[in-house]
């Protein structure tokens, strides 16, 4: 996996010619993902987050309240 480490691989043929194979870089960000429509309102999402925080960290007072 030399190509993954260095970015390209050179191949030398018996006749002396050389080829260089390089990975193609993706134009898209790995964080660019499509959203999922769950049919929830922003208020329902915030409420669920508050409930989870209260259940897991009883000492935590949410700044969103």
Image: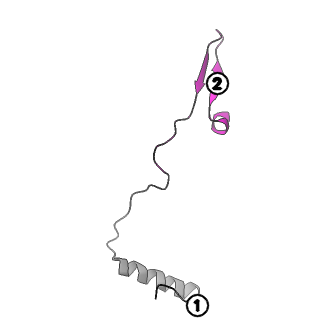
- Vertical placement of residue 37 versus 41, above or below: above
Q: Residue at x 38, y 62 (%)?
A: 35
Q: What separation in Å lies between label 1 and label 2 (alpha carbons)?
A: 59 Å
Q: Which residue is mark 1?
A: 58
Quadrant in the picture for the N terminus? top right
Q: In the image, residue 26 lies at what x, y percent?
A: 49, 42
- Vertical placement of residue 15 versus 61, above or below: above
Q: In the image, residue 53 lies at what x, y percent?
A: 53, 84
Q: Quarter of the image holding residue 57?
A: bottom right
Q: In the image, residue 59 lies at what x, y percent?
A: 60, 91
Is 34 left or right of 25, judged from the image as shown?
left
Q: In the image, residue 29 lies at what x, y percent?
A: 48, 50
Residue 38 part of the magenta-drawn span = no
Q: Name the secondary structure under disc 2.
A: strand
Label 1 Cα neighbours within 10 Å, binned few <14 / some 14-19 / many ≥20: few
Q: Quarter of the image holding residue 32?
A: bottom left
Span colored in magenta: 2-29
Is 8 left or right of 31, judged from the image as shown?
right
Residue 9 part of the magenta-drawn span = yes
- Vertical placement of residue 9 versus 17, above or below: below
Between disc 1 and disc 2, whose residue precedes?
2
Residue 1 visible (yes or no): no
Q: Which residue is mark 2?
A: 10
Q: Which mark is residue 40?
A: none
Label 2 Cα neighbours within 10 Å, binned few <14 / some 14-19 / many ≥20: few
Colouring convention used in this rendered image of the protein: one colour
Q: Quarter of the image holding residue 22?
A: top right
């Amino acid at each position: 996996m030399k190509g993954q480490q260095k970015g390209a691989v050179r191949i030398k043929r018996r006749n002396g010619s050389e080829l260089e194979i390089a990975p193609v870089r993706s134009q898209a960000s790995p964080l660019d993902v499509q959203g999922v429509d769950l049919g929830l309102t922003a208020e329902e999402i915030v409420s669920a987050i508050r409930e989870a925080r209260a259940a897991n960290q009883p000492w935590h007072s949410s700044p969103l309240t």
